[in-house]
Image: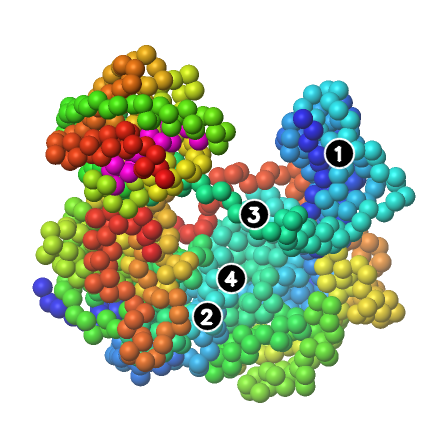
Amino acid sequence: MRHEVTMPQLGMAQDSGKVVAWMKSIGDSVDADDTLMEVETDKATMEVPAGRSGVLAEILADAGSEVPVGDLIAVISDEIGAESGAPKPAPDKPAPPKTAKFEEAIRASKEPEPAPENGLAVESPRVAPIIRKGGAALGRVLASPKAKRLAAEAGIDLRSLLRRGVSEPLLAADVESAAVAPASAPSALGAVAASDAFDELTEFLRDSGSGLSADLAWASFVSGALRATGLRKGEIAVSYRSVSAAGEEFVCRDADLAKLATLSPEGDEPADIYITNLTESRFSSFLSGQGGLPHLVVASPNQGFFSLSVQFSEQDLPLSSASAFLEELMKRVEHPVRHLL
Amino acid sequence: MREITLSQAVNEAISEEMRRDPTIVVMGEDVAEAGTPFKILSGLVEEFGSDRVVDTPISEPGFTGIAVGAAMTGLRPIVDLMFGDFLFLIMDQLCNQAAKTHYMSGGKLKVPMVVRTNMGATRRSAAQHSQSLHALVAHIPGLKVAMPATAYEAKGLLKTAIRDENPVVIFEDKLSYQEKAQVPEEEYLLPLGVASVRREGRDVTLVGTSSMIHVALDAAKLLEAEGISAEVIDPRTIVPLDEETILASARKTSRAIVIDEGHRNYGVTAEIAARIAEKAFYWLDAPVQRFGAMDVPVPFSPALEDLTVPTPEAVAEGARRAMRGELIHAA
Amino acid sequence: MKTKLQHNADAYMRMYRQMLRIRVFEENAHQLYLSAKMPGLTHLYIGQEAVAVGICEALEVSDRITSTHRGHGHCVAKGADFKRMFCELLGKAEGFCRGKGGSMHIADQKNGNLGANAIVGGSAGIATGAAFSAKRLGKGGVAVCFFGDGALGQGLLYECMNIAALWKLPVIYACENNYYGEYTHVSEMASGDLLARAEAFGIETRTVDGQNVLEVNEAAEGFVARARAGQGPFFLLLDTYRFHGHHVGDISREYYRSKEEEERWKSERDPISNFGKWMKREKIASGKELVKVEGEVRREAEDAVEFALAASYPGKEEVAMHVFAEAA
């Protein structure tokens, strides 16, 4: 690695500085705090530290020469024998004044973005938005400093509070109640649905070359079922993972509305529902053990059928709602094309 | 206990100290027979004579500079700066001379002087007679800054300031001059740098300087009715600042609101809020909120002027929002 | 029977020595600065020595002065020790201000020097306040406020002169007119008559030749005695000249004053050599005696510089000390 050393600006109205002396020679190892050189400006002579540790690889301004502020004067490299740098400038060629550099920089900053070559505006493909409310947008949980400290002390994962439906920002009181009230064991409701139509869709998507997959279809159907049941209003975020070689994992928002949208996989943000897809594996069931938000587990233990199991907390979701959701989901899985188009 | 006005408390403090120490002199515009436009110093010239209660020309930099020189050479002047707004006139003498002399002389010279001035809006005095400029001087190392909220503090802090070996600027709230408070008959001093916990509470800390302590106390009453328990702290002096008392309270309640009548930008509220954020961060359950004078020159019209100062209602609402966790984007 | 001159010979020798001490001190300060051993800025008093010495020789140790950014001369004239002065200039712990003031804030409280002031005209209040104290405490003290012609543009001075006149304070405003405020001639900065400024307040004024230490001293003696008697304040206008630039780095200065002008002042109006010649002429001192004095002064300065260069810087713990004074 090469580190460029430039003529420092040491005074208020200083355009250039004179290298009085080099305190190190080429090949010397230097410490960041070592004085590398003495520089003279209109005010005084100053000792300039190297600022980097390494080996002084090149000196590009001889002692006694006047160099514009910001110009390369030396190179410090991480190790001996590192690649050589710019050729030494001819001593009689004056370097451009500093102002020119500023002007260049100003010009560059003003240059407009190049227009598309064909002159047409390129419409960016619609991407299913994956930004969520609150701190999730930054990939973190919004909690007060005190809540964070208390959670750390009690060994509580703040995300588990979000999964239980506690709204951000998490406050100290939320953590305190979580610490005293253990999450209730989840309930589970299962069903079996015919998979032939869905399998055809999967095959079609795979062959279409569109980049779309069954993974998105699951996210879309679950979103749609939640919306149709009226269990969630506004934006609906689904956290999806597939237990398979590909191990697809993402969070997406309003996948049902995005229809055949392109997905960008994203991290583990809090969601309204979790999906674990076992259909690409040999597993047939999974119990998450997490309370709070509903969790759908999909498997295909027998050819031609999906087993659908929704795990939920009866405190948050009555059995009647869970069953309504499963009904809606089965409709979509068994008649996928109708719901996608 | 007897009750006296803030104005009487100031007068008593100066009289008692002048009786005790003959090197104390009072100087300023119309301090002698007129007793100042606020009639705070009435009677002093009769007791101590015009050699010690000295009327000056209208020359704030001049008489402040003279006080600095007098303080360096054996007197203990109390400068009366009629309005806090005139601080801008004396900044060089106060900040370049008085504040730095002890330090620049390596501790050889001292400037034991007091500048008494005032602050506070809503007296319909418009932009050049209504400012609260204590943050200006609090920024300068070497100056102490006291902000008495009631007659009790006004007397105790002023007596201490007069005995201090450093320049001390005291800001009295000009709307409080006729406010009464309990003040002991017997002599007492209040130390600089010791805050007063005016009310104990559990849920939110309200730090209020000078007359803003009344805003804080009124807000606490509003909150009490809703089951929110506010602790109210009067720092009494902002230099030195009793950081420990404020931090201990913020750690206890997990929420803090700072109220000061100076402009909100770059002011005392920012300083205190920053210290809480720096030193009590992991105890906080809500962002620290600040209430100060609006960042506008003080308008004359009562309809406008009243909008520029913090109110108990606004502070109480801030406290409620902090309790409810509604300050993700705290204003 | 001794003549008056012989009677005063000791006083004249002392004035000569004090002027020389200022000159030699400043020459050494100049060298320290040029050789980058002295940090910051420095403003040399060379050329104006008769003003500081003529006035300070008229004062008691307990009388107060305030000084300017060009203040080494006042400090020496008021009795300061070289070693502690050089230490201050170099930022050393043994300096008068423990290295916290430096050249522009040097103060010597024991000798009544309330400090140099880097705000032009900034000490007018302090000097007037010292006079106010002196009057109030009734110990007969007098204060002298040294300032340059540049300070005539500052309003504070006029406020203070007005108050001093109203209150009849024992203060002498000593205006050292060296003709240039920084790089600008006094005629471009002060309109009207300089003395009339003070006279407008009813202050008695006098103009003296600031290159003539005896004339300065005689005027100062008169004003000091009368100020002590309660007849103050007074205003003394001293015609003088700084031989060097505004500060050490002010080398190319022909754009504001000519080399001929500088040469004329140096050759014809040097306060020290002229006073030396006068002493020889009047047989107060021989050439040999004057050379001896100079030798002593130079040795004193050399020793002090050596001492200061070897002295320690203040410890890091001192940076936060002296912001506030402790209770007495």
- Report the amino acid beneath label 4: Asn
Task: Please identify, in this view, whether the residue under mark 4 or under mark 3 is nearer the observer.
Answer: 3
Viewer-side residue, A79 vs C68: A79
Q: Are marks 3 and 1 in contact (CB under 8 Å)?
A: no
Residue position for label 1: A74
Q: Earlier in the sequence, mark 3 or mark 1?
A: 1
Query: Dot 1: what SS?
Result: strand
Q: Main secondary structure of the magenta part?
A: helix
Query: Dot 2: what SS?
Result: helix
Residue B149, horizontal then vertical, whole percent: 24, 63
Residue position for label 3: A122
Q: CA distance from mark 2 to mark 1?
A: 50 Å
Residue position for label 4: B96
User: In this rendering, is residue A135 above or below B310?
Assistant: above
Are the residues flagged by discs 4 and 2 from a single subunit?
yes
Residue position for label 2: B88
| Disc 4: CA contacts within 10 A as few (<14), some (14-19) or many (>=20) | some
Q: Residue at x 69, y 21 (%)?
A: A79
Viewer-side residue, B280 vs A22: B280
Q: In this rendering, would A61 be left or right of A104?
A: right
| Disc 3: CA contacts within 10 A as few (<14), some (14-19) or many (>=20) | few
Q: CA distance from mark 3 to mark 1?
A: 46 Å
Image quadrant assignment for residue B234? bottom left
What chain letter is assigned to the residue under label 1? A
Residue A212, horizontal then vertical, whole percent: 44, 31
User: In this rendering, is residue A188 above or below B38?
Assistant: above
